[in-house]
């Protein structure tokens, strides 16, 4: 290194720019020349910088982002080292105008004007998924390599980026699995590796070990549901179930029903957003029907020309049946009478029927015996019972199966009610 203590330029004067113009002309050492950038042949994702000097000097090598007027990296090779440094590309991704600047100097002093490389860009290739097609057992994905605009055409690093594509997926818990070796193909046909996963084409290049493009989120509904086998007609009942936890967006869950095994299915209700854990619940008035849960296939993309894909495979739960039964109400209007008097029996159903017939029964100590039929009008009926002997007797009402709006409402008994006869 040439000694010139009287004209040393300190780093406090330097700030972010190196000496140029008239001030640079006062520096004692000539600027480095022939500053070149090229791909390193020994290490991946590395740029090699070389320069020439008239004699060996310590140097300061700066990787400058011209758009930000900022230094991305700084190196200080000693005078006895070769005129070369290697620069990793990871900090240079997607920069439009980069340049290598070399001067003679150290951390605290600069002794020459700048030698500069050609300006180059650092756009990293990644992948755009153009189409996703469902197959019988998986998906076919078509993609192509994309990168930012070439802001410095013909720069020293332009040319073969050595791009390779590797199909990978991530499980629901984000573990990464490869689906094949990296290569030059950009179309992949895969079988579903899991019910729920995220497919991605990872791009490796000279610029980056891994650059991920559009995601393809694949979810399969795993439908389970339960419904009560019997429930009181017209009262609120509940069907609960799960479609399994999804990776992608929530999907509409539809409750369907049909009135008989041969009749068509129709929609009862739906839930646009189920719970995060995949569970769902429907409440509605009970009727005798078969039920099932339906979720439609949904294949969408988040953007018109670019964006993540959502591939949701729906399905149906197994059919379930609930039998709705009647609520029968019976009571003596006068529960205590004297021998020879009569008491009215009041009967009412929770199923509105213009006409009907129910049976009054009495417990004889061993079994239930028929007493009389009671005609109903507009689901209400009356009858009379005469007290013939002192004592208490237990009664109930039996209502047989009825059809309401084409659907069965199953037979039921009223709660027991008592008539007491005194003298």
Image: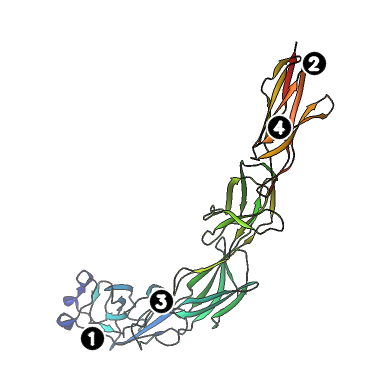
- Name the quadrant of the C terminus: top right
Q: In which image quadrant can residue 161 be found? A: bottom left
The residue pinned by badge 4 equals: 414
- Label located before the other in sequence (4 or 2): 2
Q: In the rendered structure, are the residues bearing label 3 and label 2 in contact, judged by CB atoms less than 8 Å apart?
A: no
Q: Residue at 55% of width from left, 82% of height from top?
A: 185
| Inter-mark Cα distance, 1 to 4 | 110 Å
Q: In the rendered structure, are the residues bearing label 4 and label 2 in contact, judged by CB atoms less than 8 Å apart?
A: no
- Name the quadrant of the N terminus: bottom left
The residue pinned by badge 1 equals: 30
Q: Nearer the viewer, residue 313 or 145?
A: 313
The residue pinned by badge 3 equals: 89
Residue 112 x %, y %: 23, 81
- Label located before the other in sequence (2 or 1): 1
Residue 279 x %, y %: 58, 52
95 left or right, relative to 236: left
Q: In the rendered structure, are the residues bearing label 2 and label 1 in contact, judged by CB atoms less than 8 Å apart?
A: no
335 left or right, relative to 196: right
The residue pinned by badge 2 equals: 389
Specify few, some or many for label 1: CA neighbours under 10 Å numbering under 14, 14-19, or 20 or more. Answer: some
Secondary structure under badge 1? Answer: loop
| Inter-mark Cα distance, 2 to 1 | 133 Å
């Amino acid at each position: 290194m040439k000694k010139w203590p009287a004209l040393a330029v300190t780093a406090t004067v330097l700030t972010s720019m190196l000496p140029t113009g008239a001030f640079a002309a006062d520096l004692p050492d000539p600027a480095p020349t022939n500053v070149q950038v090229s791909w390193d042949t020994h290490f991946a994702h590395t740029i090699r910088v070389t320069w020439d000097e008239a004699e060996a000097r310590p140097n300061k090598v700066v990787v400058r982002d011209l758009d930000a007027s900022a230094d991305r990296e700084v190196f200080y090779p000693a005078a006895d080292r070769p005129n070369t440094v290697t620069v990793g590309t990871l900090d240079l991704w997607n920069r439009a105008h980069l340049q290598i600047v070399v001067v003679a100097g150290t951390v605290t002093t600069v002794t020459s004007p700048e030698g500069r490389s050609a300006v180059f860009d650092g756009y990293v290739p990644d992948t755009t998924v153009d189409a996703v097609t469902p197959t019988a057992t998986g998906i076919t994905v078509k993609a192509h390599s994309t990168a930012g605009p070439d802001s410095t055409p013909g720069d020293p690093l332009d040319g073969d980026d050595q791009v390779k594509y590797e199909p990978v997926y991530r499980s629901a818990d984000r573990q990464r699995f490869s689906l094949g070796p990296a290569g030059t193909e950009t179309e992949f046909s895969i079988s579903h590796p899991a019910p729920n996963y995220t497919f991605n084409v990872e791009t490796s290049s000279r610029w980056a070990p891994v650059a991920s493009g559009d995601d393809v989120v694949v979810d399969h509904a795993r439908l389970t549901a339960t419904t009560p086998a019997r429930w009181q007609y017209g009262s609120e009942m509940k069907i609960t179930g799960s479609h399994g936890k999804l990776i992608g967006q929530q999907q509409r869950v539809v409750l369907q029903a049909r009135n008989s095994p041969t009749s068509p299915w129709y929609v009862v209700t739906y839930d646009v957003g189920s719970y995060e854990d995949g569970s769902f619940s429907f409440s509605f008035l009970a009727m005798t029907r078969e039920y099932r849960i339906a979720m439609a296939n949904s294949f969408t993309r988040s953007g018109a020309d670019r964006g993540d894909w959502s591939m949701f495979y729906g399905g149906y739960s197994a059919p379930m049946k609930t039998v709705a039964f009647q609520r029968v109400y019976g009571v003596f209007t006068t529960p205590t009478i004297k021998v020879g008097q009569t008491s009215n029996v009041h009967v009412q159903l929770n199923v509105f029927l213009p006409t009907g017939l129910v049976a009054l029964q009495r417990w004889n100590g061993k079994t239930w015996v028929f007493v009389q039929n009671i005609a109903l009008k507009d689901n209400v009926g009356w009858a009379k019972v005469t007290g013939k002997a002192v004592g208490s007797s237990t009664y109930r009402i039996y209502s047989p199966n009825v059809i309401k709006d084409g659907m069965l409402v199953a037979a039921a008994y009223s709660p027991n009610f008592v008539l007491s006869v005194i003298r």
